[in-house]
Image: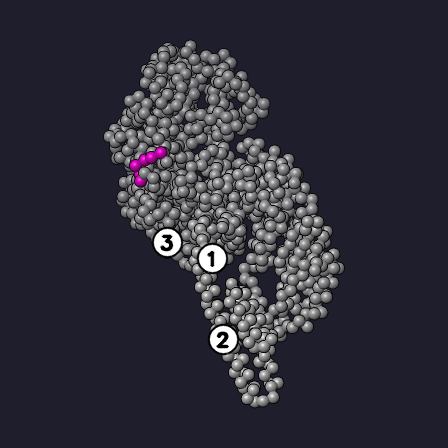
């Protein structure tokens, strides 16, 4: 193929190209390593005369340049065309995104993490105690001897082997006191069990959170501090709470903690049972006998225990009207969280 | 307990509304659960706590309100004083069963119907009118908290003319027909009131039918006693006979109060029944032995968290009926006879704070020493695994710890703990694993969610000991087994744990698609497709499940991985496609290729599918890389043949 033919063919091919990919093919065919132009250039050294070599080089390069310019023009043209096409294309950007598989954390777990974070900032350490418990840790060492009438506070499930299903997380108290030396700051968030039929407001399986703090000079004032701090974190800065007397055999004095009903702000509504207040936590100063049972000298140390029922708190906070949702595994419920 | 507001006003001149009184009682004493209007009266439903047995009466609540409002009490009577001309009754008491036992004989009674006001008040308190003689005992019990029981003296005399009454423990096999007409079997430890012919009442629980008072009764033996609370409670519960009376006997009762209320009831028998008191006997302590509890200023301050003046504390205590003396150390406090719950300085401090007002307790920041908070691997891994699984589309569930007998037909295991007092047959056993709860949850959701992924991280209770388990189940997906296995392997990678698997036979798992999970030699759980029959029983499509002992997992898990240097030299990628029958192990082949040369740096499964002919087709991508130099085609030439050979020897058929 001579140079004139090569030039004509290249320019013709460039003219008929309709896509950028084709254009690249054409470029490689003509200007590539094995293209006609390079072939001709490689033949130049074979020319015998210096002037011929020089003019041949010039001529071939000028053709090469023409082809390059044509390629560049075509390239520009095609890109403009391509852009116009992209501009003209349509895509519904309002179409919802493709969902990744969506999981959900159980609301009690979410709450557990929140509560743990709040108290671990104050140096409370998470502890566990058995669900299947010896009578003495669940009752006896907490001032609740066998057959004592105060046991009526707890309808208990028993195993055939004589152990109880713990009725509260307080079974951790004496266990932890015996393991540790004051100051003791521990917390637990775990399940408890009672002999109770399941209905929208009751469940034989439920959750408790409890902290125990034993140190020198632990007082009702500090109980108030801890209680306010936590309830404000959960229910909001504006939350109003109040203390009133409450009896648990393992504390003295005993405290019931009420929170002002967030729905009616104390006026009394159906949700708070016309009371204006919710009983939300139970607390008190650890009974000296319980401290002694834990190997701690009540003359030197005192302690506080404070606990609440996360199920009930979440029901109030999130407007959940049936405790059974927590334990039935209904994905219509769980996937909301 | 239901308390009439107008009745309270007979003992204390309340000027506040019933609603205000209820609110004040709640804040200072015990909770009031509600107020009901009955006629022109209002009735407070008071939630008496165990320590405040003294509030189980109109007088008790009136005393408390008098202390709260600093008002005087009125309408009180003196203690009953037996006079000498009363004939003694032969009574044998065992003071370990009955701290104080009294009998009073009332003769020449003339019956009339119970006055309307008494009937109304009994009914407002949730009791029924029976006849005048019984109604008066209930009326005074409501007013004073002390239960009474009236025997028909003539009927007792017919059984035992000597009227020798004895308090004793029931004998084995002893029976009594109670007021409700039922024959009751008694056991040793039940306290009975007996004459020579046998039991005439179950002490504190219910009287016998044979000696019941009725409209024809003209002579009564009136019992007023303080029994052993624990025994009363045990008997009443066993017989399902818990009553207003047995409830009061379970609490602390005061001998002083007994004698006061006895005086009052005898007045009523004289007024309404025209009776004469003709006999009396008592065995046991006649009055509460006074005792004192000390309260130092230091103690009060340590409980309150602030310094309250002792002079103020003294006033509060005196309002509550304490006798108080100042001593060098602080206050010496003698609780009133009706407050058996006050035993230690903390009890006294609580009384002071109650009257002072719990709401006045000032918040006091905690000041303490910092202590090391120990690492808690279980919590750390619980968080990681929960977010890992939920990120992979799993919903966390929480389920009850019980399994039903019916569900257990699907799980043939003897590794079960049984409850002594199950709530129902639905909850007779403790779950030994999470399998059944997971299946039940899948069943509950399945038609609504044709695919699902759920997990639970909670306790299971095999006989070997409760432990925290992680169980996960997926249903309705393609490749449930491999899909779930991939999830588990990912957990293993996160924990930098090498999980080993080997085939396992479990009745609840697919006969072939089932493996046990090990870390080294330690078995930590199982994974498998749910046995098709079991899945069908729970109306599920193909499902796969795993369960691991989470405590072991968290214990073995490594938080911090080790860095492996990334080679500076470029890698070469090559794909191999081959057919491999399901009878041959892909994992083994992969391991062999990996260890065939140090130049094989990585191997990943790029694609796998089942061919139309039913063969397993696998494409693996091998990454060759050297730590020392740039590899050329020549370097890996010998490896190609070696790997192809490995594939063929492992049963693979290389596809071109």
The front one of A196 and B178 is A196
Determine whether B203 is above or below A157 in the image: above
The residue indicated by pointer 3 is B366
Which image quarter holds the C terminus of chain B?
A: bottom right
| Magenta: main secondary structure | loop
| Disc 3 and disc 1 in contact, CB within 8 angstroms | no
Mark-to-mark CA distance, 2 and 3: 87 Å
Q: Give the class, few, some or many, for how many residues have Cα within 10 Å of label 2's Cα (few <14, many ≥20).
A: some
Drawn side of residue B155 relative to residue A232, left or right: right
Look at the image and give the residue range highlighted in magenta. A265-270
The residue indicated by pointer 2 is A66
Q: Give the residue at x 60% y 49%.
A: B484
Q: How is the image coloured?
A: one colour
Q: Give the residue at x 44% y 60%.
A: A84
Q: Earlier in the sequence, mark 3 or mark 1?
A: 3
Instruction: Please determine if labels 2 and 1 lie on a single subunit.
Output: no
The residue indicated by pointer 1 is B373
Q: Give the residue at x 47% y 33%.
A: A199
């Amino acid at each position: 193929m001579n140079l004139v033919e090569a030039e004509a063919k290249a320019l013709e091919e460039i003219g008929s190209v309709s896509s950028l990919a084709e254009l690249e093919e054409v470029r490689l065919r003509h200007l590539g390593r094995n293209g006609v132009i390079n072939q001709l250039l490689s033949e130049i050294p074979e020319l015998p005369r210096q002037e011929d070599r020089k003019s041949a080089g010039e001529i071939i390069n000028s053709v090469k340049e023409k082809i390059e310019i044509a390629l560049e023009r075509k390239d520009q043209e095609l890109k403009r065309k391509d852009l116009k096409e992209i501009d003209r294309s349509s895509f519904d950007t309002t179409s919802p995104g493709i969902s990744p598989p969506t999981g959900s954390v159980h609301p009690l777990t979410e709450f557990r993490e929140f509560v743990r974070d709040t108290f671990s900032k104050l140096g409370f350490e998470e502890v566990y105690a058995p669900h299947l418990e010896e009578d003495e840790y669940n009752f006896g060492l907490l001032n609740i001897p066998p057959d004592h009438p105060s046991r009526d506070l707890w309808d208990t499930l028993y195993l055939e082997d004589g152990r109880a299903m713990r009725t509260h997380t307080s079974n951790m108290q004496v266990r932890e006191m015996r393991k540790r030396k004051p100051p003791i700051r521990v917390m637990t968030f775990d399940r408890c069990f009672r002999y109770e039929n399941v209905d929208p407001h009751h469940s034989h399986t439920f959750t408790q959170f409890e902290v125990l703090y034993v140190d020198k000079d632990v007082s009702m004032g500090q109980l108030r501090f801890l209680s306010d701090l936590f309830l404000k974190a959960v229910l909001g800065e504006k939350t109003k709470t109040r203390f009133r007397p409450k009896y648990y055999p393992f504390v003295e004095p005993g405290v019931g903690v009420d929170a002002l009903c967030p729905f009616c702000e104390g006026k009394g509504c159906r949700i708070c049972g016309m009371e204006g207040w919710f009983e939300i936590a139970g607390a008190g100063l650890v009974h000296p006998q319980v401290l002694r049972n834990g190997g701690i000298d009540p003359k030197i140390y005192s302690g506080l225990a404070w606990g609440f029922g996360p199920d009930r708190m979440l029901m109030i906070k999130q407007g959940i009207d049936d405790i059974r949702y927590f334990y039935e595994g209904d994905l219509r419920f769980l996937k909301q969280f | 307990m239901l308390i009439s507001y107008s009745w309270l006003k007979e003992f204390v001149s309340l000027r506040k509304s019933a609603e205000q009184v209820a609110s004040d009682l709640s804040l200072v004493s015990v909770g009031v659960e509600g107020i009901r209007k009955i006629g022109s009266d209002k009735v407070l439903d008071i939630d008496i706590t165990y320590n405040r047995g003294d509030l189980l009466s109109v007088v008790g609540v009136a005393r408390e309100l008098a202390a709260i409002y600093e008002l005087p009490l009125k309408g009180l009577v003196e203690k009953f004083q037996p006079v000498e001309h009363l004939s003694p009754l032969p009574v044998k008491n065992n003071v370990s069963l009955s701290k104080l036992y009294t009998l009073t004989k009332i003769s020449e009674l003339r019956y009339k119907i119970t006055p309307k006001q008494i009937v109304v008040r009994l009914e407002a308190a949730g009791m029924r009118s029976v006849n005048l003689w019984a109604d008066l005992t209930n009326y005074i019990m409501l007013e004073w908290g002390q239960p009474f029981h009236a025997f028909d003296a003539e009927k007792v005399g017919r059984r035992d003319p000597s009227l020798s009454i004895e308090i004793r423990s029931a004998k084995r096999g002893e029976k009594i027909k109670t007021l409700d007409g039922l024959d009751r079997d008694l056991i040793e430890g039940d306290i009975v009131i007996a004459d020579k012919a046998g039991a005439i009442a179950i002490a504190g629980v219910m009287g016998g039918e044979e000696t019941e008072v009725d409209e024809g009764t003209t002579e009564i033996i009136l019992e007023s006693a303080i029994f052993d609370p624990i025994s009363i409670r045990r008997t009443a519960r066993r017989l399902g006979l818990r009553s207003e009376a047995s409830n009061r006997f379970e609490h602390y009762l005061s001998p002083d109060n007994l004698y006061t209320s006895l005086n009052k009831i005898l007045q009523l028998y004289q007024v309404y029944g025209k009776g004469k008191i003709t006999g009396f006997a008592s065995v046991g302590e006649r009055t509460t032995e006074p005792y004192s509890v000390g309260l130092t200023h230091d103690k009060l301050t340590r409980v309150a968290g602030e310094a309250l003046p002792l002079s103020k504390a003294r006033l509060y205590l005196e309002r509550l009926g304490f006798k108080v003396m100042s001593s060098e150390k602080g206050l010496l406090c003698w609780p009133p006879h009706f407050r058996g719950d006050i035993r230690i300085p903390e009890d006294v401090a609580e009384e002071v704070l109650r009257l002072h007002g719990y709401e006045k307790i000032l918040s006091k920041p905690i000041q303490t020493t910092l202590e090391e908070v120990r690492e808690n691997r279980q919590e750390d891994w619980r968080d990681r695994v929960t977010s890992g699984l939920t990120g992979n589309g799993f919903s966390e569930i929480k389920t009850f710890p019980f399994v039903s007998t019916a569900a257990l037909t699907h799980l043939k295991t003897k590794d079960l703990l049984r409850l002594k007092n199950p709530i129902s047959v639905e909850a007779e056993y403790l779950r030994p694993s999470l399998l059944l709860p997971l299946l039940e949850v899948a069943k509950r959701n399945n038609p609504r969610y044709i695919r699902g992924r759920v997990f639970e991280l909670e306790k299971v209770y095999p006989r070997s000991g409760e432990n925290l388990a992680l169980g996960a189940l997926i249903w309705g997906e393609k490749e449930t087994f491999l899909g779930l296995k991939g999830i588990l392997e990912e957990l293993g990678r996160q924990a930098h744990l090498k999980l080993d698997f080997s085939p396992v036979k479990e009745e609840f798992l697919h006969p072939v698609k089932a493996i046990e999970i090990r870390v080294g030699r330690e078995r930590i759980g199982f994974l498998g497709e749910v046995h098709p029959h079991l899945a069908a029983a729970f109306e599920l499509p193909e499902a796969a499940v795993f369960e691991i002992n989470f405590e072991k997992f968290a214990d073995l898990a490594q938080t911090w991985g080790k860095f492996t240097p990334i080679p500076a030299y470029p890698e070469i990628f090559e794909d191999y496609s081959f057919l491999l029958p399901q009878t041959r192990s892909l994992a083994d082949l992969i391991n062999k290729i990996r260890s065939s040369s140090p130049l094989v740096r990585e191997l990943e499964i790029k694609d796998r599918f089942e061919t139309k002919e039913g063969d397993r087709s696998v494409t693996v991508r091998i990454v060759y890389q050297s730590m020392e130099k740039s590899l050329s085609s020549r370097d890996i030439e010998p490896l190609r043949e070696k790997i192809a050979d490995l594939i063929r020897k492992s049963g693979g058929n290389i596809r071109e």
